[in-house]
Image: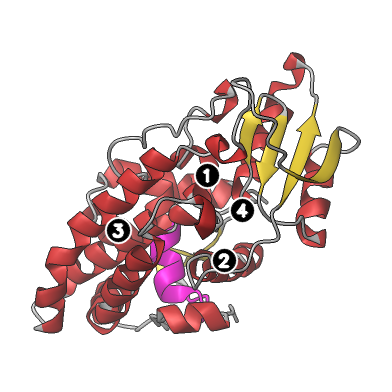
Amino acid sequence: MADPFDIEEIFPDDDAATVRLPRRQSGPAPQGLAVTLMADYTLRTRAWLPSAAIVALLVESGVSEAGARTAISRLARRGVLQGRREGRHSLYRLAAAAAGQLSAGGQWIVSSAAGAEPWDEWWTLIAFSLPQRERTRRRELRGRLRWLGFAPLYDGLWISPHALTDLAASQLDAAAPGSLTVFRARHVEFGTVARRDPLRAWDVTAIAAHYDEFLRHWRPLLPRIAAGRVAGAEAVRARTEVMDTYRRFAVLDPRLPVRLLPPDWPRLAARDLFAAVYDGLARAAEEHVRAVSTRHADGSAPAVSAHTVAEILAGVGGS
């Protein structure tokens, strides 16, 4: 089964061997929004939702009706959603494998900004060589490396400040068996103009700009949330968007060592703001999703259940 989310939503030009942070594609990504929506309200229960309800909720988030239906169909073909017929209704739920990946991914997203970890100053380097004719495998491997927090220092040489876990190693081996060489090394300053700082594999200036944009966009909503003035479709739309935007930071800024970053790095500020918006809208958003789903299910209420950031960190399992 494919990953629930597509790395090209974040790095649309990833096969170009660039170390610059690409611009995010404009407009909502329907498949990403659909996965976020299903995870936010059905991950705990894996409830079946009418396709008409999913379409209606996506339309409220700015996706066209045709785009919403196409997104659902493609997610079903990819194995992210499981479908069935019930009378005149088509219903969908998260596939078991997708629910497991989303639960683990949610923990990773939240824990990536939970606090600064001590760094041993060792880097993990992965070198690979795949012929140009194997373009699909190259893209798959690059995407997997991105999800695991690596970035390209040079073409064919990717780097991370963290050790490679056994799970990550098995995933990379499955993506490109026999094509990788893994090193653990420390950076040595040799005092010439030809040197390249490993941190330059990430566009730190662009990442900081993404954080600043996130903070500017969401801070003004906090007083309205505190006053209970965000409800209904607006609550769902805002909660889906804040998660859909924030989840990208775990890939853009994969727990880069704070000691290497500029002062007042905004990772924790963004995490706190995300939690305030996401948790603050949980009840109102859950009520609206339940109401829309019930209306399209001829009155039977699906087991819709929102969760908090703390519950994501603890692990939200599908039943």
Binning the other alpha carbons within 10 Å of mark 4 as few (below 14), some (14 to 19) or many (20 upward) gives some
Q: Which secondary structure, mark 4?
A: loop
Q: Which mark is residue 6?
A: 1
Q: Earlier in the sequence, mark 2 or mark 1?
A: 1
Residue 314 in magenta stretch:
no
Residue closer to the observer: 111 or 264:
264
Q: Which mark is residue 241?
A: 3
Residue type, label 1: Asp
Q: Where in the figure is residue 181, as x and y percent of width and height?
A: 86, 37
Q: Which mark is residue 79?
A: 4
Q: Earlier in the sequence, mark 2 or mark 4?
A: 4
The span from disc 1 to disc 4 (Cα, nearest Å) is: 13 Å
Q: Residue at x 52, y 51 (%)?
A: 260
Left or right, 210 with reference to 84: left
Q: Which mark is residue 108?
A: 2
Residue type, label 2: Trp
* 47 to 215, vertically: above or below: below
Residue closer to the observer: 301 or 165:
165
